[in-house]
Image (cartoon, rainbow, N blue to C red):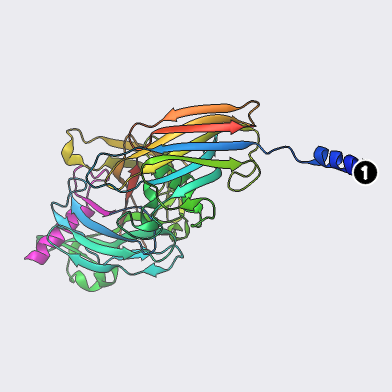
Amino acid sequence: MHKRSLTCLLLAVALAAPLAAQAHKMWMVPSATNVSGADPWVTVDAAISNDLYFPDHHPASLDQLVITAPDGQTAKPQNASTGKYRSVFDVELAQQGTYKLALVNQGVFARYELDGQKKRWRGKAAELATAIPAGAKAVEVAAIDSRVETFVTNGKPNTTALKPAGKGLELVPVSGVTDLVEGEPATFQLLLDGKPAAGLTVSAIAGATRYRNAPEAMSAQTGADGRFTFTWPHPGMYWVNAATEDDRSEVKQASKRRLAYTATFEVLPE
Amino acid sequence: MRRLLLSTFALLLAAPLAAAELSVTVQLPEQPVAEYHRPYAAIWIERADHSVAAQLAAWYAQKSSKEGAGTKWLPDLRQWWRRGGRELSLPVDGVSGATRPAGQYRLDFADGKAPLGTLAPGDYVLVVEAAREVGGREVVRVPFTWPATATQHLDAHGSSELGAVALDINP
């Protein structure tokens, strides 16, 4: 029963409308984004919720967690646990530079009819062939490709961990990812399969939503070069999200591909 | 005798003119609190584009103690850290040192000598930033032009974590 409701929830998240205004938000938020010292650590919360950044709904699964260290290698999380409303893990920042923390979710979602009943299935592309029973009709398959990221810099920032893989929707920094200050414009670039993602709508919502009445979502469009800029009105953690859809999935049975990119950035006071 | 006089005269003429001097006086105010930690503080000179022209001082707990946990809290000096603090490989001789208790401190620097070095002519800002554990953080800025044509005394004042800040330039 628990597994089925988890699947239903994940389906709901995966099918979320692009602006995510009606759907839950998935996020990771680190305890700090600029650290230094002899042995710096950060602890990270990962959850799916409505309010930012209050875990009030469902923990994020850490199965898909990828931590990229400043030298480009993968680092391991420590003390990971998944509770009722959030997952937590620690990162020991052994290197100087910028770490990228990412929850990478790639899968497929299928809808079909069997014996007059509408069915749904969600899982990995490799399992698709055996998951859909013979005799299924009106089969619709969509590929899901979503990244939820955040960044931590130990000492001086660098960009090695942020080099794009060239697949899906990815963010590349222009003015920095952990160097954000209230009142200063910050520019980023979105890439789709390695190429600038033009004409996407990007939204940014400041955390602490519980303590204000208006949602205060900001919106920006990516230019032809895939770039977008936000000028942060006040310090805090910001949830930044963009989503798009196309038909260029690598999964041959998939008729469409739904992509989403989410990042949490910390904006510090002047 | 005449040769001695001549050579002495020549030496006097050849002696270098005294280098311009820059003095910074910083007051760390008393804080009427039960839990008091000496503030972390940094002093630097910025150009108009916010790039760092000289790192003059960085006071932080040299090792973990009840006064602070060493380099761990340096990013709390937010502006200093971002503008150039994080580029430094600490400790730096003549720049970094231990945190200081409340009081008035005067630091003297000579043009052409580390850590002031040689400043190209132009407009600069002397910046002092202080952050105190379980306390506040403050930045005080004193703009000045270099080189000065006459002796200059410039005053500024913080309101919480910094007291009087003075800049004296002797050309």
**Total residue callouts:** 1
Amino acid type at mark 1: Arg
- Which quadrant is the N terminus of chain B positioned in? top right
Residue at 48% x, 36% y is B25
Question: Which residue is situated farthest in the left direction here?
Answer: A1
Q: Residue furthest right?
A: B2
**Left or right: where A234 falls relative to A165:** left
Residue found 30% across the figure and 67% down from its top? A77
Residue A156, percent from left and from top:
46, 55
- As drawn, the residue found furthest toward the bottom would be A130
Q: Residue furthest front?
A: B1
* Magenta part of the chain: A1-30
Which of the 4 image quadrants contains residue B11? Answer: top right
* Residue receiving disc 1: B3
SS class, disc 1: helix
Residue B100 lies, with reference to residue A168, above or below; the image says above
Q: What chain letter is assigned to the residue under label 1?
A: B
Indicate left or right for A178 with A81 as reference: right
- Compared to residue A72, the image places residue A12 above or below, namely above
Residue nearest the viewer, comparing B152 with A225: B152
Residue A252 is at least partly visible in this image = no
In depth, the one of A107 and B29 nearer the eye is B29
The percent coordinates of residue A50 (x first, y second) are: 17, 47
**Place of residue A180 in the rendered image (x, y in percent of width and height, measured from the top left):** 39, 44
Report if residue B148 is visible in the image: yes
Judged left or right of residue A172, residue A87 is left
A123 displayed left or right of B87: left
Taking the magenta stretch, the answer to whether it contains residue A28 is: yes
Q: Would you call the spot at circle 1 few (<14 residues within 10 Å), some (14-19), or many (20 or more)?
A: few
